[in-house]
Image (cartoon, grey):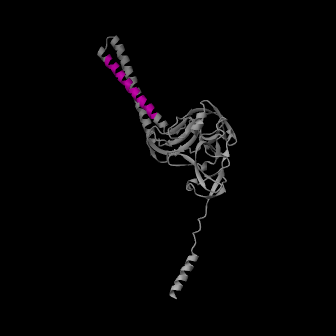
């Protein structure tokens, strides 16, 4: 009887066991790969002034007043900050007094030498006395020059307790803190001049090969734009698929620090180039870039790509992709190759 009960229990246990349910598919946001056209060949750049200045005191001192802040537009010569002027004012006053005393001594020495010249000519004084008087004049002149130079230096130091803008422009940084005692040369402000400007942008080596120094390109910022001339390309570095392009602005208004879209000449995008979200491109430790493609069955595969350019429209890439394929638009680094996912349309 006991044996039959155990057998029945075993049979019931066997009937109740089953395979574990498969884990639910992970959801992945995907975007469709688009065929690129020449109009998509854009890069994003940052406007910089060709005149950048660090504004610092010539002498150490305590910062007692700040008259500008980040983002302020300032005129040439405008006072930006003030240092404690009292020590320099005392030095300037003392040096002026010393200079005045030296002037009095010099006048007296010259009068004495002139008096002795007349006496020597009349035979009423010895030549040695005249020579000594002329030596005194030379010494007095040297003393007068030294005190005059020192007075000028102290007057300059007093004037330099006021930091002024060397050119018109925009304050881009403020390093000085009110009340701080700063050494000579310590920057208080950084200033971007309002003169000649350039656009600095990163481009792929493939794009750089198609650019020529002197080429005129158009740029857009908000609802306005202008033209710029390619003035330089950084050398290509081994293992780095990017170079720095510099475009000197020749027309249009774009303030230093602004981000602009630069439209490259037609032909930057070839028939095999594709557009996809920049967030879809991931890089491994070696710097190689790839995207994760989602097949019809939801299974993922990694495909290497090369970034040609980047713009607000996305990334222009080359690789073994086809228009219409779906790639994981964000979070691809979390997906393992071969993993199946449930795709959802990505909305940027």
Q: Residue furthest right?
A: 223
Query: Which residues make up the magenta segment?
Result: 130-155
Where residue 1 sits: x, y (%)? 52, 88
113 or 70: nearer the eye? 70
Where in the figure is residue 314, as x and y percent of width and height? 64, 46
The residue located at (60%, 37%) in the rendering is: 207
Which is more toward the observer, 278 or 19? 19
Query: Would you say 95 lies left or right of 339 here?
Result: left
Residue at 58% across, 53% down: 332
Q: Which quarter of the picture shows residue 71?
A: top right
Which residue is found at the position 33% from the left and 13% from the top? 120
Residue 236 makes an appearance in the image: yes
Lateral position of residue 63 relative to residue 329, left or right? left
Q: Position of residue 269 (x, y in %)?
A: 65, 39
- Quick check: 7 above or below 318? below
Vertical position of residue 279 compared to residue 88: above or below: below
Closest to the observer, 157 or 200:
200
Residue 189 location (% of width, % of height): 52, 42
């Amino acid at each position: 009887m006991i044996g039959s009960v155990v057998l029945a229990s075993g049979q019931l246990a066997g009937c109740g066991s089953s395979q574990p349910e498969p884990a639910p598919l992970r959801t992945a946001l995907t975007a469709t790969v688009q065929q690129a056209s020449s109009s998509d060949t854009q890069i994003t750049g940052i406007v910089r002034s060709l005149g950048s200045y660090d504004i610092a005191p010539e002498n150490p001192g305590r910062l007692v007043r700040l008259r500008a802040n980040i983002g302020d537009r300032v005129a040439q010569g405008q006072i930006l900050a003030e240092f404690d002027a009292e020590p320099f004012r005392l030095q300037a006053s003392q040096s002026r007094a010393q200079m005045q005393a030296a002037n009095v001594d010099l006048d007296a020495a010259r009068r004495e030498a002139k008096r002795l010249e007349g006496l020597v000519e009349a035979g009423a004084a010895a030549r040695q006395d005249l020579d000594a008087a002329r030596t005194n004049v030379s010494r007095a002149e040297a003393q007068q020059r030294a005190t005059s130079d020192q007075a000028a230096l102290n007057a300059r130091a007093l004037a330099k307790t006021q930091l002024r803008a060397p050119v018109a422009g925009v304050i881009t940084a403020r390093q000085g803190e009110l009340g701080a005692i700063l050494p000579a040369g310590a920057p208080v402000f950084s200033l971007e001049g309002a003169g000649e400007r350039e656009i600095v942008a990163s481009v792929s080596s493939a794009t750089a090969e198609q650019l020529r120094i002197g080429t005129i390109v158009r740029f857009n910022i908000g609802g306005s734009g202008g033209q710029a001339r390619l003035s330089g390309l950084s050398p290509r570095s081994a293992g780095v698929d990017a170079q720095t392009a510099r475009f000197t602005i020749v027309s249009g208004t774009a303030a230093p620090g602004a981000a602009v879209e630069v439209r490259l000449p037609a032909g930057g995008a070839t028939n095999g180039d594709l557009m996809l979200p920049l967030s879809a491109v991931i890089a491994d430790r070696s710097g190689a870039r790839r995207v994760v493609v989602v097949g019809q069955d939801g299974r993922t595969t990694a495909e290497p790509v090369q970034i040609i350019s980047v713009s607000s429209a996305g990334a222009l890439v080359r690789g073994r992709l086809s228009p219409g394929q779906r790639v994981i638009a964000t979070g691809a680094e979390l997906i393992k190759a071969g993993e199946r996912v449930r795709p959802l349309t990505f909305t940027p």
